[in-house]
Structure formats: structure tokens, C-alpha cells
Amino acid sequence: MSVRVCHVTSVHPADDVRIFHRECVSLAHRRGNDGMCCYEVHLVAPNVADGERDGVKVHGVELPSGRLQRQLFLDRVYRRAIEVDAAVYHLHDPELLDLGLRLKRHGKRVIFDSHEDVPGQLLTKEYLPMWSRKPISRFYTIMEQERLKRYDAVVTVTSSIAERLRRVNENCVMVTNFPVYADTPHQWKEREERYVCFAGGVDERYMHENIIESLRYTRARYLLAGRCFMASYWQRLQSMEMWKKVEYLGVLPPERVSEVYQRADVGLVLLDYSPNVGYHKGTLGVLKLFEYMMAGIPVVATDFELWKEIVEGEDCGSCVNPHDVQAIAKAVNYLIDNPDRARQMGENGRKAVRNKYNWATQEQALYSLYDSLVNR
């Protein structure tokens, strides 16, 4: 008999990469020694039609999009989740911490998945008044500790968060956001135009203003794809003089993103230092870095301690201070002026993902956690 498990989110879309495409689909494909499915996987998610996809049964809950309004309707999420009657529940949002305790009272085993360092994240939330951020962060830390010590397990994406949460719940496992490996070597072509690229969230965290300004000092153009949710930030970018060197490609489906990488000579992932990523420590929770590596293009990345260990250790690019426009331009110029070296770095990154930084390694950690909870 397969064990019924249920992932629950009130914030993320039903097709979220980490929740659906990584964790849910992997569990649905888990087979025992007898070849039978180990887990019957369900997903409760907001504003989606009920259905089944890739072996995962999806249950939609109608919720308002506003952050405050949504809190009034979380009981809908609880009722939908309890209807599934799973043995194990896997929750993905801080606003569901109390819901997990309600499930525990029904004798369910409950996992919390901390995608972000939430106390650190709260210190930089622009929707919160500056004076309120530290008190709210402290309040959340206390609440998080009180709830999570009563959970059966905690999952997170990077070592700094795992170290903090392991002091609250010793059954804390790191399952990070490495890509599912696909063998798609980069097709290098001789051309006059040189491109750097980014495909993802167009927001201030990824230092797009500094990247665009760095174009002044390099002959590269910028392939940019993704959605910008802040109109004022988008206007600032478009008003910059060097915007004329940006080729904005809009919002692309996942299958089209690989086409961007094939056109590019360099992948940029210049995430700002912030409490959410441990300032200069960094995080392994950003998929972008590993996507570039898998695509076989060299990277120019933030000089986080964790990223420098990977990028310099695997010799697949350069790490720079994301606030230093000249350093960004210098790193890009080196790669486009030395194409043989760039190709070798790209190939080094691709091999590193194939051998180490791929989802198959994290899938095993997820399986081990679930197997231990079920057997217990």
C-alpha cells in the first residue's frame, strides 16, 4: 500500500518549481523494491482547478491574492487539506505554521519547508514600516521556534538556515534547489554580437541597475527576460542611458529560457547582500546559478562565500562585488575577450552539475526523510 502524503501551499502557484516539479513529482515517482509506488501524492494550492498531473493529485482552494485578506481564509486551506486525510503533510508557507499544529492534533506527521530565512527576509520587506521590521522579525522568530519544535521534521534549502533551524528541531534536512540535469551542451557560434543574460525575477535584489550601467564599459548586450512587479523600478531601468543595450524578451515559459542561454556568452546572477541570504554567506537556494552552469555558459556571480567555493572551485566563472560596476564589466570583458577560456569554464560548470549539483542528489535526501517518517 502506498502512503498518502500532501503538500500544502497558500502562496505559491500549483506549478511551483520546488514544490511541484521537484518534491511532489519526485515522491510520486518513488518506487519500492517491488516496483510499486511508495507514495500517493496530493497538493493543495491556491486558485487552481482540481486535477492530476505527473502522478500528483491537485486540489484547488479559492483564496484572495492580498497578503492580509488571505489570512482570513486560511481555514479553507485547512479544510481542504484535512479532506485529503494524508499520513504526512508538508507545508510550504510561514502563514501555515499554526495549521500544522492543527494537523498534529489529528495525529498527522507534519513537515515544514523553509524556502527562505524568514526572520532575515522580514528585515528588508518594503511593505513594512522601517521601525516595525526588527520587532516583527523577533516576534516571528519566537513564533517559529515555538511551532517548529513540535513538528516532525523541517526541510530547508541552504546551510545557514539549516544551522539555525536545527537548534529548534534536530530533524532538519537540507534539500536544495539544484536543477534536474539535462545534457544540453552549449552551441558556441562565431558572431560579432556578444551577450550576457538573465532570466528570472526583474527586481532590485538582482542588481539590474548596476548590470545595465556596466554595459557602458563592455561591448556586450544584455538579454533580459522575466516579470517586474514594481512599476517604479521598471521605469528606472528603462530610463537609464544604457537601456539601449538591453534586449528585453518578456516573460518566457521554461522551455524558452534555454533558448536565451544558447544565445548568451555569459550568465549573470548578481544577487545583493541581504539578511535573507546571510549577507556575505550566501545561499544555495537560488536555482539560477546552477541553470547557467548546466547550460554550459560561464557565470559572473556575487562573491558570496558559498558561491565562491562553487564557482572558483569548479573554475566555471568569476565572483564579484555586485555593487562594483567596474568589477562586473571587467569580469564580463575577460570572458568575451577570451572565448576559449570561456568555453572551458562553461564546460567545467556543466560537468559539475552533472556530477554534483543536480536534483538527483537532493531527491535522495527527500526520500530518506519521508521513509524515516513513515517507518517511524
Image (cartoon, helix red, strand yellow):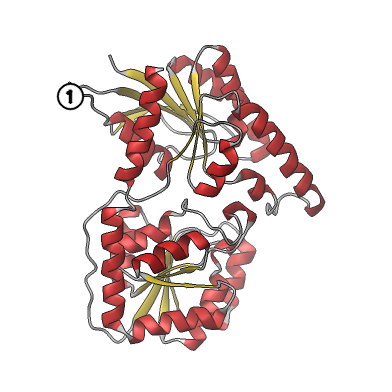
Coordinates of residue 219 in the picture (x, y in percent): 41, 87
Taking the image as shown, residue 6 lies to the left or right of residue 69, namely left
Quarter of the rendering containing residue 106: top right
Coordinates of residue 14 in the picture (x, y in percent): 43, 37
Coordinates of residue 191 in the picture (x, y in percent): 26, 84
In the image shown, does 288 or 59 lie closer to the viewer? 288
Residue 235 seen by the camera: yes
* Residue ID at (33%, 75%): 265
> SS class of the residue under badge 1?
loop
Residue 58 seen by the camera: no
Q: Residue furthest top?
A: 106
Quarter of the rendering containing residue 336: bottom left
Coordinates of residue 283 in the picture (x, y in percent): 51, 54
As drawn, 123 above or below 12? below
Image quarter where the C terminus lies is top left
As drawn, 212 above or below 217? above
As drawn, 354 above or below 334? above
* Residue ID at (39%, 24%): 372
Taking the image as shown, residue 255 lies to the left or right of residue 65, namely left
In this rendering, the count of numbered labels is 1
In the image shown, does 273 or 219 lie closer to the viewer? 273
Taking the image as shown, residue 27 lies to the left or right of residue 73, namely left
Q: Which residue is mark 1?
A: 35
* Residue ID at (36%, 31%): 368
Q: Residue furthest right?
A: 131
Q: Amino acid at mark 1?
A: Gly
Image quarter where the N terminus lies is top left
As drawn, 153 above or below 298? above
Quarter of the rendering containing residue 369: top left
Q: Residues within 10 Å of mark 1 (few under 14, many from 20)?
A: few
